[in-house]
Amino acid sequence: MSAPAARHDAGTAPPAHIAIIMDGNGRWAAARHLPRIAGHREGARALRRTIEAAINHGVSWLTIYAFSSENWRRPVAEVLDLTGLLRHYLRSEVAELAANGVRIRMIGDRDRFDPDIRADMEKAERDTAGNSRLNLTVALSYGARDEIVAAARRLARAAREGTLDPATITEAEFAAGLYTTDIPDPDLIIRTSGEQRLSNFLLWQGAYAELIFLDVLWPDFGAADFAAALDAYARRERRFGARPG
Ligand code: FPP
């Protein structure tokens, strides 16, 4: 990893937690008359660059949307390509990430993946649990609405069992039932490829996140785009719903 980049001198403090919707792999491949998997492979390279950029900029938390709960509905061949890439990534990249101080966590419905992938996910989490330089959260088979419904069910069960009074439920108690219970809310959500929507990503956690939409396709995303997003964020004024002071 290279030396830390210069910090911002603008008003808003650098984001502690950046979340990224990595979009545009398919279009990147189509523009080159390549199969979609070529775009996903190049996307995995962009992910490596992004992790390095996050470390170099001193970002503590990075969450990436690698596979949504809706992605299971893609053609079987593409799902197999994506899960194959995930398997490869978990086996070949985790050691280097661990050596660079990265802690890896997965959020999402991991039960839908094959047992060998689930075992590799658990190993990656276990092997990196002591690291804290960068907290990397990988959203896999993740859908925010499913996550919110599961959190609601958990409270409903407690209410039915008589251990919880619905009238006293707080935001914190609700959030404790989300996958991200130990993870701070994102300060900044970046989406590549020019699309401007959240696509069921961190809907609860992103309530006050700044949103930045970039025209670059994910496989082309690099350190300069990361730095540009940080600069754009630094120019935002975050008020969290309060009136300007
Ligand atoms: C969206 O592009 C991207 C995905 C559905 C997959 C993201 C996966 C990677 C970046 C690969 C590396 C990550 C791991 C850990 C496996 P799209 O296919 O929706 O692109 P399109 O909108 O242009 O069709």
Image (cartoon, rainbow, N blue to C red):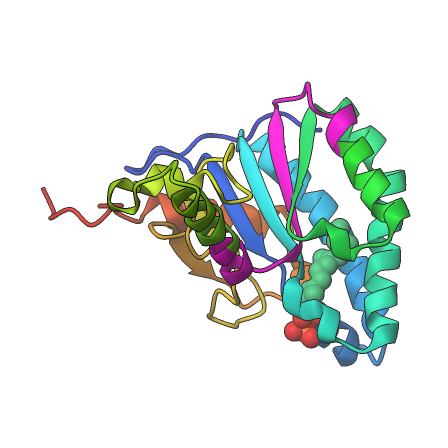
Residue located at (50% from left, 36% from top): 181
Q: Quadrant of ligand 1?
A: bottom right
Which of these two is toward me, 87 or 175? 175
Q: Is 139 positioned to the left or the right of 43 in the image?
A: left
Which of these two is toward me, 77 or 165? 165
Quarter occupied by the C terminus: top left
Residue 97 falls in image quadrant: top right
Q: Is residue 190 above or below residue 48?
A: below
Residue located at (38% from left, 40% from top): 162
Residue 179 falls in image quadrant: top right
What segment is highlighted magenta in the picture? 125-149
Q: Is residue 61 visible?
A: yes
Residue 170 in picture, x, y percent from top left: 30, 40
Q: Is residue 131 magenta?
A: yes
Q: Is residue 24 visible?
A: no
Which residue in the rendered view is the most extreme toward the front?
161
Q: Is residue 236 above or below residue 53?
A: below
Quarter occupied by the N terminus: top right
Residue located at (75% from left, 76% from top): 74
Which residue in the rendered view is the most extreme toward the top?
130
Q: Is residue 103 magenta?
A: no
Residue 168 in picture, x, y percent from top left: 26, 40
Residue located at (28% from left, 37% from top): 11
